[in-house]
Amino acid sequence: MNIFGSKRLRYFLQLCILVALCCGVAGKITLMSVAIPIFVSVILTNKIFCSYLCPFGFVSELAVKCKRVLKIKGYAIARNSLPDKLLRSIKYIILFLLVYIASPLAEASGIALLLFMVLIIVPSLFIDMFGCKYLCPVGAASNILKYTLVVVGCSLLFWILRSADVNVPIPVYVGIMCIIGYLLEIFTYKAEYNVSLLHIHRDKNKCTQCGECKKACPYSVNVCNVTRVVDIDCNLCGECVSECKKDALKVGICNTREGQNQIKGQWLPLLVVVIFILVMFYITSKAI
């Protein structure tokens, strides 16, 4: 049974988080308190948080659907174009500013969340997934964490310098990571070498390269030309998997980089989502 690509499941979970935000429950959770579970989930399971739990991703997708229903003429920003590269820097700047002024923003107010939601919705009415792709600081952090070896190397260097009594402020470290993450993103658009357990895999024997998967993808990732999706924008939403009529796409663990016949652990993403929700409930209960 294909549990991924289920719009009902994704929208239900995201809507629950959105309602919690509006009711002030999530306001009890600080930005720092959710950093660790998000960090772990991104490292091990790619960007599942973005596709199954992020309420801002929900409103962004909703805005795109409203645009199509209302037949609003949109504007497409070509991937790898100069505007695309420049706009991708915004989310890294926002991430750095959040860390630099972390104290006043550690507990986001309802008004701040509402303004951020508006900031995501309005552009997405004209440019698909504008907020998630260009504005979201969590997306920036997730993309940085996809380059696992780079993160580990820089973190180790930062730890060595701090151990040697070299005062390197945390904002400086975050700023360097933001610059590295941004440059890697705009020049590679993929994170080939990471320790994430989960990816979308394509069975070349079943695939007819009809291109429907690319049309279904919110980020227009060219899934039909790869055997393992490592695109920097892929958040494992599963839209491509759901759209594939030939059952050529699966989300799971593959024991070889190019193999696609031994996909395992298709239950793991759902388990991670459930664990993440339980952790959030636990943090909330401690914060109240």
Image (cartoon, helix red, strand yellow):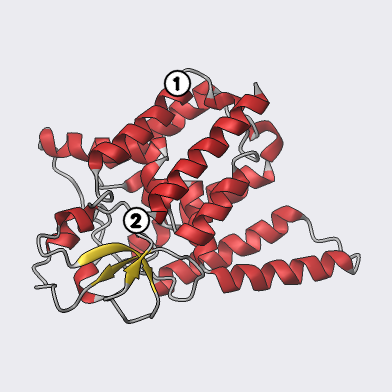
Residue nearer the viewer, 18 or 187: 18
Circle on res. 1 = none
Which quadrant of the structure image shows residue 234? bottom left
Measured from the top left, where is residue 176 in percent x and y? 64, 64
Mark 2 Cα shell of 10 Å, populated few (<14), some (14-19), many (≥20): many
Cα separation, mark 2 vs mark 1, equals 26 Å
Element at badge 2? Answer: loop
Task: Report whether 78 appears left or right of 256.
Answer: left
Earlier-in-chain disc, 2 versus 1? 1
Return the residue at label 2.
236
Task: Report whether 9 appears left or right of 25.
Answer: left
Residue under the image location 13 percent in, 72 percent down = 207
Mark 1 Cα shell of 10 Å, populated few (<14), some (14-19), many (≥20): some
Q: Residue furthest right?
A: 165
Which quadrant of the structure image shows residue 74? top left
Residue under the image location 40 percent in, 35 percent down = 55
Measured from the top left, where is residue 164 in percent x and y? 90, 69
Return the residue at label 1.
22
Residue nearer the viewer, 12 or 92: 12
Q: Amino acid at mark 1?
A: Cys
Residue 134 in view of the camera: no
Measured from the top left, where is residue 129 in percent x and y? 30, 47
Task: Report whether 97 appears left or right of 256.
Answer: right
